[in-house]
Amino acid sequence: ALCPLARVDTTARARGPVDPPTRPEQPIRPTEMGFEGPIPDYDSPTPGGAFEQLLKQYDDSGGLDVLDESSGAMNNIICVSFPLPEARSRLLDDLSGTYDFPVALEPCTHEVASDTIAALHWAQDSSETIERHLCRYGALLLRGFPIRNPQDFAHLTEALGWPNFGYEASGGNAVRRNVVGDRVFTANESPPDKVIPFHHELAQTTRYPHRVAFFCENPAMRGGATPLLDSGNAYARLRDEFPDGLAELQKKGVRYTRVMTVDDRPHSAIGRGWSDTFGVSTPQELEAKLASTGDKLEWLGVSLSHLGVDGDRYPVRHYTDVRPAVLVDPHDPERRPRFFNQILAAHAGWRDELNAPGASVVLGDGTPMRQDMLDAMERIFREESVSVQWRVGDVMLINNLQVMHARETFVDGEAPRRVLASLGRDPAPVMEERLANSQLGDGVGSNREGRKYAWQATGGERRTHGPPALRESKTRAKVIRGNPGIAARRAAARGSSHAASASLRAFAARRAVLFAR
């Protein structure tokens, strides 16, 4: 399983880092440390004593302060920064405790923080761990990594193992411009004074991406945050407040409709033309492509000439077949129902000179949506969301099956706001391939694949100098997860359990979260 249930406790992280005491002030319960067994004596130096048992159990459940000594690579080590100012604490369950949404990651070493190739190797080596976090927590923010341009961003999504999901002919309605092949493209370029409401990417289609990544090349002077929403929480709130309405929605599903022309209308947030939307050139090709899908077309001819749309632009009203409104991510260990749709975005955001407000989404049987429920969606989404302010070089990784995103209005400075996007198909097959290769490889965490990426073939071979020391931050609490089977060997190589004991005591004092494998 890519996303096993991990025991997690982050309830004390908001208190910040503290100086490690001689021993923990309070014993750490086994469930908080991610292993089973009695509370050990941390200061026991005797071989086979309580500390050695603790170290073994601790190593088996993930390990702390571990490196791949054969290559010097930072394999499967994740450093979680102190919570973002805008993050919210979320309760996962009574056993696991709380976590911060979104989870923010930062480099563990100076090399990963300063060298792009090292950061890409870190991303490749840590891809399985990152994927487990996305399955469990929904969104990760990478801050402080040397991702400096669109090419770096494209290489990062490759290193993470995301099979590319091109936006061309995807059925999406936003005008996009490709930047790096079809892997990196502009985010929705609707006018800065327009809000882009909450939505799951391409949820109005039958073929949607599993992963969404954003890269901030240049933030806005003011505003322009990207709000995030755990749609599992949205579902739970709607179930409590509108049980009958949600049941009807789940039973009937939804249908979306949009008027478009053959060409793009860049001034509109939904102005993508039907030629690019569906990857066709003529009306006959469009009809043939949609003939077996259940979608319907209504050619409008010259009926929109009063709006400046002549018949030679082939305006058409597109009706989707019935789409589900709720989804369960198959890789979610909690199997939580998610409010997976574009209902609010279609109702509040699909409007321009060709599309009337509130006319873009109905129930699956054609009846209108309940207005009180639509109003409640807008309120609940706002109350449950977190708005992340961008910094240069930030990368946001989103599990599109679990988390909605939006865009706030903004004001540009001298340079315009530029946030790029990349989409990924289900990465599970790649993760399984990497896991199999690591088990057949020459070391734990070795993510050797048959393919060779461009960034590896052009001076990007792995460094072979000694493993860097784990960086201790003075201002951030660390959450570190490493390879099993290495921590004990490193402790033995040091010739003394004192240093390892100090490291464990520091971890226990901070009461950070251990992401168990």
Image: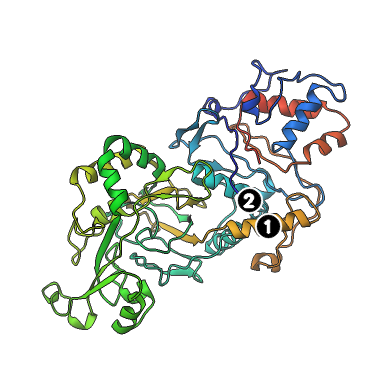
Residue nearest the observer in this picture, 64 or 55 = 55
Does the residue at mark 2 contact the one at mark 1 (Cβ under 8 Å)?
A: yes
Quarter the C terminus occupies: top right
Of all residues shown, which one is farthest toward the front?
Answer: 251
Q: Is residue 351 left or right of residue 52?
A: left
Residue sitting at 67 percent across and 28 percent down?
Answer: 507
Where residue 428 sits, quadrant-wise, is bottom right
Q: Is residue 310 left or right of residue 420?
A: left
Q: What crowding class fits label 2: few (fewer than 14 Cα within 10 Å), some (14-19), or many (20 or more)?
A: many
Residue sitting at 33 percent across and 37 percent down?
Answer: 237
The number of numbered badges drawn on the structure is 2
Where residue 116 sits, quadrant-wise, is bottom right
Amino acid at dot 2: Glu
Q: Is residue 118 left or right of residue 346?
A: right
Provide the residue designation for mark 2. 128
Q: Is residue 391 left or right of residue 192?
A: right
Residue sitting at 23 percent across and 46 percent down?
Answer: 374
Which mark, by number, is residue 434? 1
Query: x%, y% of residue 91?
Result: 47, 31
Amino acid at dot 1: Arg
Give the mark nearest the N terminus, 2 or 1.
2
Task: Establish if 383 lies above or below 262.
Answer: above
Residue nearest the observer in this picture, 253 or 70 = 253
Could you give the CA–CA distance between mark 2 and mark 1, rounded to whole angstroms? 8 Å
- The answer to whether residue 101 of the structure is visible from this angle is yes
Of all residues shown, which one is farthest toward the left?
Answer: 306
Helix or strand or loop: what does disc 2 sit on? helix
Query: x%, y% of residue 371?
Result: 18, 46
